[in-house]
Structures are given as structure tokens and as C-alpha cells.
Image: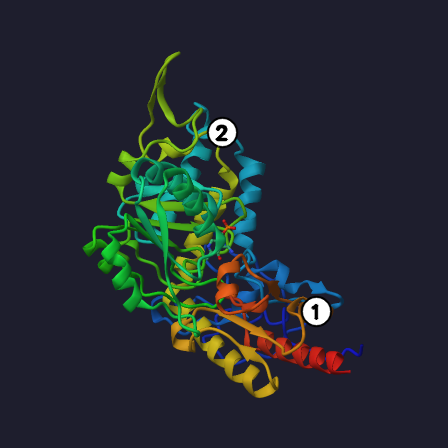
Amino acid sequence: MTDTLPGTTVGATAGVVGSTATTRPAPVAGAAGAAPAAGAAPAAGAAGAAGRAPLDPYALRSDFPILATQAHGRPLVYLDSAATSQKPRVVIEAVDTFYREYNANVHRGIYEIGERATAAYEGARASVARFINAPSAREIVFVRNATEAINLVAATWGRTTIGRGDVIVLTEMEHHANLVPWQLLVQEKDGDLEFIPITDDGLLRLDVFEVLLRLKPKLVAFTHVSNTLGTITPVAEITALAHAAGALVLVDGAQAVPHLPVDVQALGADFYAFSGHKMLGPTGSGALWARRELLEAMPPYMAGGEMIREVHLRRSEWNDVPWKFEAGTPDIAAAVGLGVAAEYLIGLGMDRVAAHERELVVYALETLRREVPGIILYGPPAGQRGGVIPFNLPDVHPHDVAQVLDRFGVAIRAGHHCTMPLHERLDLVATGRASFSVYSTREDVDALVAGLREAQRIFAG
Ligand code: PMP
């Protein structure tokens, strides 16, 4: 194989702090990893604050140390942010500082570092609440990830609410995390699952949804943004229809919070689940938001220390919400890091993040169509999708494509992306998927294009 990928400016553009332009800055060799960010404020690229110049991903990149590294001797081109995002220095440092300076358990220690740990942990909860405009930090339950958030709702609200013959409506494009917990629940309770179908472009068939609502479902649970097709679902509209039919609504926000402004009050849903590691936070962090009265009514999820107010040999009383759902020692460092990630994104402005990724999707779809003959692109039009580009090259397995791309330092995901039923619906074995985040650039897309052309050349011969 010959290495024909053109050099990119990846990781070499840090010296543009304060730049308000989206134009490609001149490379500044060796500048990556420059000045560390102070507090949770982005080091660069968001400086426009209220002036709100468009997000400058080139300037932001110096906040992300890993983007200055190499893979196979090439600058890392990270196009797998839907699997997990990279982390800005402020998040890495927040975790490091916790362990170095005030590692102690929370809600317990009557001593200085214990109080500092508790304040940081609860402060992070307040930041996460602000990030999604929750009415109260008491409505934020810290969990490990979106999977745990959804399992928590299924195991508590679900087990006490769903009975024989009760219907839960999902969609055909759910991540397994928002499918399998409901399968287990209806198997146990003898309930039923129904599915909102999708069009071939990956849009939800709301006309069929309205028919399904005649079954009087107890819950409608669906993704805000599809991790495979990128489809942005009309959450407020679906929620209004579901509520009018008497159903509660759970939204899987794992792929939405990193990319779109999310206001849980405006959306009107009842439960909103998301992971921290996809929104620039540490692995092991995530949150469930639910309306306070629901959290109050739900039984505990796991039991043990922290989640109790009083324990006697034969009975116990539960702690207040949200601590009723946080049994045992939590991942304090991860939660603190998540709070910093939320503040970082608030600082960037999620409207600017969304606009940046929308622009990149338009560029990617156009460039791939033009430059990679025969490429098959899936998903809805640019205006209706987040920063996810699923594709296939005819007659080449996406794993092989991903392997060739890897040789050029380009990281994409290949497989079923934990949406096997969606792949079945589209009659696909697997897809390649490139996905974006705040730090993604047109040069990343160009590197993908060059790698795909190389893959085509290799597999044609
Ligand atoms: N829902 C969606 C839409 C996702 O993309 C993912 C992660 N790929 C999840 C849920 C599960 O997230 P986690 O693995 O962090 O629990």
C-alpha cells in the first residue's frame, strides 16, 4: 500500500487564540498543546462570548491534548466522537486535581477535603442541571452512562408501572441501550413493545405513531439523535402527542447533549438520559434527569449506603432524591469532570456547536458524494441530522474500510453500532460511521475522503 494521504493541518493550529474567523488558519508547527485553559472556560475559540462569532474548531483543538498525537505516524484524525468524545484539558485536570488535592468520600467527611469533595460533587450536579436547563439540581441523578440511566427507569418506574398487556412504544432505530431494558421489562410483566417505523431515509413515521397511540401506551421511549443515522427526532412534537394519549416520555439524549442545545423544560419529556463521556466528560459519568414527582414516587434502584435515611434490621427509609438513587460511593472524580465538561460546553454555546456540526455535515455529504465515486450515504438530509455520517463502499466490508483508514491515522467506527434492528430494517450487515464533535474540521473530512479513495483503489485491485 502506498501512503497517498495528503498532509493535514490537524493538531498544528493552536496558535490562533482569539481568532474569530472560521477560515482555515495557517499551521503553527509545534504549537499544539499550548497554554492550558483556566477553570472550565474553553482556552480558545469561544472567546467571542456574547458576540458569538461562529465556533472556531481550529482554535479549540489546542484544548484537546490527544488531538496533537499521532496514529501510525500520522496526525490522529478522530472521527469516532459518537462512540466517545475526546476530553479537553480542563476535564482531564479536574479529575487529576480531585485525586491529587481533595480525594475523600462525599456526604460523610467532617473535615476539609471531605467537604471540598462534597461541594465539588454537588456543584457538578448544579452544572449538569444548568446545561440541560433542569428546573432543579435535585432532579439530576448521577449514573455511569445513558445505559444505566435507562435501566434505572425500567427497573424502578417500569417495574412498578408496567403490567400485563401494557404497551411501550419505541422506534426502529433505538440503540440497544434503549431497547433491551424494555424487552426485559415486558418479558417479566407480560407487556408489549410497539415500534414507530422509519422511512428509508431514517425519519420517523409520525403518521404510524399516531395510530400506535390508540393502543394507549404507558411509555414512549426514543432517541433524540440517532447514533447510526444522525436523525434528529422532533422530541417536543412526539412528547405532546404522547402526553395527549396519556403516556410518559423517556428521551435517550446520549447523542443529543454533545451536539445540540437541550432544554428539558422546553422539550417537555418526563425522563432524559445521557452519558458524560460523549459530551467531553470522563468515562463513568452520566445523568438521568426526571421530573421531581416521578423521582419521589419511584422506588430505589440499587440499595445500600448513601441511599438511606434510616436503617433498622428489618426495614429502612430512603434518602431524599436524587441521593435515593445513588447507592454506594459514586464515581466522584467522573462526576466532577462531567460538571467541568458541562461548563465548558456552556461556555462554547451549544447553538454554536450545533451550527458548526451542521456546516461540517453539509461539507462532508457534498464532498463524499463528489469525491468518492459510488459511495452509499445513509440517513436524512443535512438539516435533519446531527454530526453523524453513515456510509458504505460497494462490495467492501466496512471493517476493511476502517482498517485501511486506520493506516492513515483516521479513526472511524465500523459495524452495527449497537443498532442491529435498524440495520436489519435497512437490510444492511454493517456500516462505516464518521462522527463529529466540537473539534472536528473540514480537514478531518478531507482526510476521510483521501483514505476512502485509497481503500477503493486497494480493493479494486
Ligand atoms: N443511546 C445512544 C443513542 C447511544 O449512541 C449510546 C452510545 N453509543 C447509548 C445510548 C449508550 O451509551 P453508553 O454506552 O454511554 O451507556
Specify the quadrant that holds the N terminus: bottom right
Residue at figure coordinates x 40%, y 33% from the top left: 301
Q: As displayed, is residue 318 above or below residue 6? A: above
Q: Label 1 sits on what residue type? A: Asp
Q: Distance between the residues labelled 2 and 1?
A: 47 Å
Q: Name the residue under label 2.
A: 105
Q: Can residue 21 be seen in this view?
A: no
| Disc 2 versus disc 1: nearer the observer | 1
Write down the residue under mark 1.
400
From the viewer's perspective, is 271 left or right of 446? left
Q: Position of residue 18 (x, y in %)?
A: 48, 70
**What is the quadrant of residue 72 in the picture?**
bottom right
| Viewer-nearest residue: 387 or 67 | 387
Residue 104 screen position, x and y as percent: 51, 30
> The residue under label 2 is which amino acid type?
Asn
Residue 315 or residue 36, whichever sits in front: 315
* Residue at figure coordinates x 63%, y 72% from the top left: 10
Q: Which x, y percent locates residue 430?
A: 59, 66
Q: Contact (CB < 8 A) between labels 2 and 1?
A: no
Quarter the C terminus occupies: bottom right
* Residue plotted at (53% across, 39% down): 98
Is the distance from the Cβ of mark 1 to the nearest ligand 1 atom less than 8 Å?
no
